[in-house]
Image (spheres, rainbow, N blue to C red):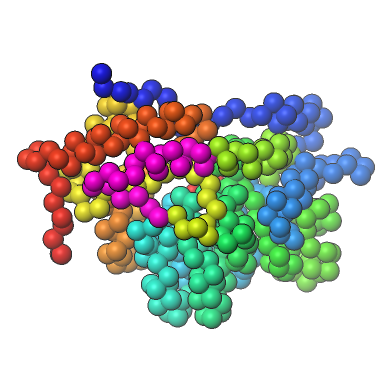
């Protein structure tokens, strides 16, 4: 009998009971706004910031309304403004170029490699062409050689803002993701590593940058109520110069997140068990290429990607349809039109059109799937068997859906 998978790919785990209890307490006292505190009460949001700073080893942390807000706020706090060119990965998700566009800056795309990380040779070329900053996306959790990346950007004198929406809890050579550049940005939106529906976090060691970020987020002159903020002196000058662009986190979300942060190391182990099960199940499948995860990279395997290198579009479509018929929901970054979350650099037409032949070739065969913690390792092993079987079927079926190496056009 043909095996089928029946669970949804978009179902997260419930909020832990401890988070539900903490949320109810906030609802009962009604002080949801982070600066609505009584006496010497410390707001849930301030406590979350303190705990997340400790988790990442950063001096300062700020909680905000979304991951996208965190990116825009970080760029602005780093001094990026209208008309500036900000480099970012040619393969990422829409909120990344969107955050650049939101402050009136212009995205400049850098090629990616077939390990889905930014191409450091292309980056080295492009940093010298008038870039004001790099907004580095650790897209789908793939971390590039951060030592080399920082050497390139430091030599060019441009700040690095890290988008860690997919690497919260990950690390490169023992340094937590988000701690190499000037600012690390995280999302706590439902599909990320902690779930408050919407939400974001920024970390930095730079007192001026963080003071600006806090003022931007809408602190009024209440920044002394933060626990992971720079000292009052850091605000002295910038408080007159920094506009309020409200994007605060509230105490309800923070209350939900604090127990999830405490549980994150255990969740990461569970994600990685799923990831390694999928990797083992797809190993040595002819026609399918796995990404290489370097030993220096501590991963959080909350999603899985593989390549069908040089497959024709019609063969990929056949494969996707056959997997879907067996209950396996895959995303393809090579479709002609953007669907769901899978838009591409050529869909972001507010940015100047750019030539990225290497990235285009990779995206044409790039398959992506979520690994939610509602899956068990047995579930993932079943998905891998289905994918392996369907790759082999499509790759071997001659006439209907041939796999033909693209010509060099
Ligand atoms: C989700 C996501 C963001 C933004 O997060 P939101 O909280 O949804 O605004 C940024 N970058 C990437 C790569 C993401 O996947």
Query: In this picture, is 55 found above or below 326?
Result: below
Q: For residue 396, say whether it is visible.
A: yes
x, y percent for residue 109 = 39, 65
x, y percent for residue 53 = 72, 54
Residue farthest along the top direction in this orientation: 1
x, y percent for residue 297 = 52, 57
User: Relative to 286, is 381 on the left or the right?
Assistant: right
User: Relative to 389, is 26 on the left or the right?
Assistant: right
The C terminus: image quadrant: bottom left
Query: In this picture, is 168 found above or below 319?
Result: below
Residue farthest along the right direction in this orientation: 39
Residue 275 covered by magenta stretch: yes
x, y percent for residue 366 = 32, 49
Q: Total marks drawn?
A: 0
Snapshot quadrant of residue 317: top left
Residue 274 covered by magenta stretch: yes
Which residue occupies 25% across, 18% down?
1
Which residue occupies 12% across, 44% down?
402
Comparing 149 with 24, the one in front is 149
Span of residues in magenta: 271-292
Which residue occupies 25% across, 53% down?
309
Comparing 57 with 291, the one in front is 291
Q: For residue 61, say whether it is visible.
A: no
């Amino acid at each position: 009998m043909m095996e089928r998978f029946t669970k949804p790919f978009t179902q997260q785990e419930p909020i832990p009971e401890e988070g539900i209890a903490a949320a109810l307490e906030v609802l009962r006292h009604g002080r949801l706004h982070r600066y609505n505190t009584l006496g010497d009460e410390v707001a849930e949001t301030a406590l979350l910031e303190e705990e997340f700073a400790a988790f990442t080893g950063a001096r300062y942390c700020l909680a905000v309304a979304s991951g996208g807000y965190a990116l825009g706020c970080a760029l602005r706090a780093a001094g990026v403004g209208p008309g500036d060119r900000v480099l970012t990965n040619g393969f990422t998700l829409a909120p990344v170029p969107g955050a650049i566009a939101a402050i009136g800056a212009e995205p400049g795309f850098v090629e990616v490699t077939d390990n889905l990380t930014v191409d450091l040779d292309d980056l080295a070329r492009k940093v010298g062409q008038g870039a004001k900053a790099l907004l580095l996306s650790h897209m789908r959790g793939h971390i590039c050689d951060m030592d080399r990346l920082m050497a390139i950007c430091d030599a060019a004198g441009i700040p690095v803002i890290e988008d860690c929406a997919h690497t919260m809890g990950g690390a490169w050579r023992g340094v937590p993701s988000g701690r190499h550049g000037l600012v690390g940005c995280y999302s706590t939106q439902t599909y990320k590593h902690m779930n408050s529906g919407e939400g974001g976090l920024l970390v930095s060691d730079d007192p001026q940058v963080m003071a600006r970020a806090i003022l931007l987020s809408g602190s009024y002159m209440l920044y002394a109520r933060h626990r992971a903020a720079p000292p009052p002196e850091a605000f002295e000058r910038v408080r007159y110069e920094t506009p309020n662009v409200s994007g605060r986190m509230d105490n309800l979300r923070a209350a939900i997140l604090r127990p999830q942060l405490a549980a994150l190391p255990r969740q990461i182990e569970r994600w990685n068990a799923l990831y390694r099960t999928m990797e083992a199940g797809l190993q040595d499948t002819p026609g399918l290429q796995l990404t290489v995860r370097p030993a220096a990279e501590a991963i959080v395997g909350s999603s899985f990607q593989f390549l069908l290198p040089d497959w024709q579009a019609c063969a990929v479509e056949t494969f996707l349809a056959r997997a879907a018929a067996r209950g396996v929901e895959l995303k393809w970054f090579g479709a002609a039109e953007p669907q769901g979350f899978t838009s591409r650099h050529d869909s972001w037409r507010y940015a100047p059109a750019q030539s990225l032949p290497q990235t285009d070739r990779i995206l044409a065969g790039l398959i992506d799937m979520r690994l939610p913690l509602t899956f068990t390792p047995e579930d993932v092993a079943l998905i891998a068997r289905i994918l392996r079987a369907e790759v082999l079927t499509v790759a071997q079926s001659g006439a209907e859906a041939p796999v033909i190496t693209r010509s060099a056009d």
